[in-house]
Image: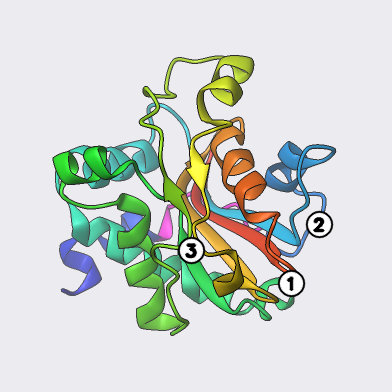
Amino acid sequence: MHFEEVLCLNCLSDLPRTRFHADPANKVEQLFWGKVQLTAASAFLQFSRTGKVQGMLHNLKYHQDKQVGLLLGRLMAEELRACPRFQEVDTYLPVPLHPRKERKRGYNQSRILVDGMTEVWPLPITGNDLMRVVRTPSQTKRGRLDRWINVKEAFQLPDPQALANKHVLLVDDVVTTGATIEGCVKALEQVPGIRISLFTAACA
C-alpha cells in the first residue's frame, strides 16, 4: 500500500519526530539510568494525548489498522539504520503481549511495527524468546510504582542461549515510564554476552 493511502504527504511531513537517536543522554535513555543497562535507546515520534501520533497508535492497537503500523515501522527503520549507535543490532525483538490478549486483538502491535521495519532494514526477528507469562492490567492510568509492580514478574525467557552474544533491539509502540521495558530487560539480562537496545514508535 502506498503511504499516501495511510497518511497524507502534509501529515507525514508534520510528524513530530524526536530526532534524538544519536544523543546518549536523550529523554528515553534517561528513563533507564540507574535501573537497567541499555546499549542505546530512542523513540521515533513525540507522543501527546491529543495529537496525531496518539490517533495513529490508537488505530493500530484498537482498530485493526495494521497499515499504519507497517508505515510507522518503515519510517522508524529508515531513521534508525542511519544512526551509528544502532548499526550493530543483530535481531529485532517485539515486546510481547500476553497470548490471551494477543488472541483477542488478533496480533501484537509491536510485531506489526517490526514487520514494517524489516521491509527497510532486513534483520532476523526473535519472536518467541521472550514470553509474557502474566496478563497485566492496562498500564494507561497507573503511576510509576504501580506500573513497575504490574510488570516486574511478567516476562520469562525460555531459551536464554538463543540470544547469547546478540545485540537485541526491543521494539514497542510507546514508552512512558519505562516499566514494561524494565521488565523485559530484567528477563533478558540473564543471557550471556547479550546487549539490549530499545526503539519505540513514540515516547510520552
Q: Residue at x 55, y 73 (%)?
A: 162
Density class for disc 3 (Cα within 10 Å; few <14, some 14-19, many ≥20) is many
Q: Amino acid at mark 1?
A: Arg
Q: Can see residue 129?
A: yes
- The magenta stretch is 13-19
Q: Secondary structure at mark 1?
A: helix
Q: Report how far apart the C-alphas of labels 2 and 1 lie in the structure.
A: 9 Å
Circles 3 and 1: CB atoms closer than 8 Å: no
Density class for disc 2 (Cα within 10 Å; few <14, some 14-19, many ≥20) is some
Decide whether the magenta segment is chiefly helix, strand or loop. loop
* Residue 83, percent from left and from top: 67, 74
* Residue 104, percent from left and from top: 15, 39
Question: Is 204 drawn above or below residue 59 in the view shown?
Answer: above
N-terminal of the two: label 3 or label 1?
Answer: 1
Q: Secondary structure at mark 3?
A: strand
Label number found at residue 85: 1
Q: Residue at x 30, y 45 (%)?
A: 56
Q: Report how far apart the C-alphas of labels 3 and 1 lie in the structure.
A: 17 Å
* Residue 128: quarter of image: bottom left
Circles 2 and 1: CB atoms closer than 8 Å: yes
Comparing 38 with 20, the one in front is 38
Comparing 33 with 28, the one in front is 33
N-terminal of the two: label 2 or label 1?
Answer: 2
Q: Amino acid at mark 3?
A: Leu
Comparing 146 with 40, the one in front is 146
Which residue is the site of mark 2? 24
Label number found at residue 93: 3
Determine if the magenta segment contains residue 59. Answer: no
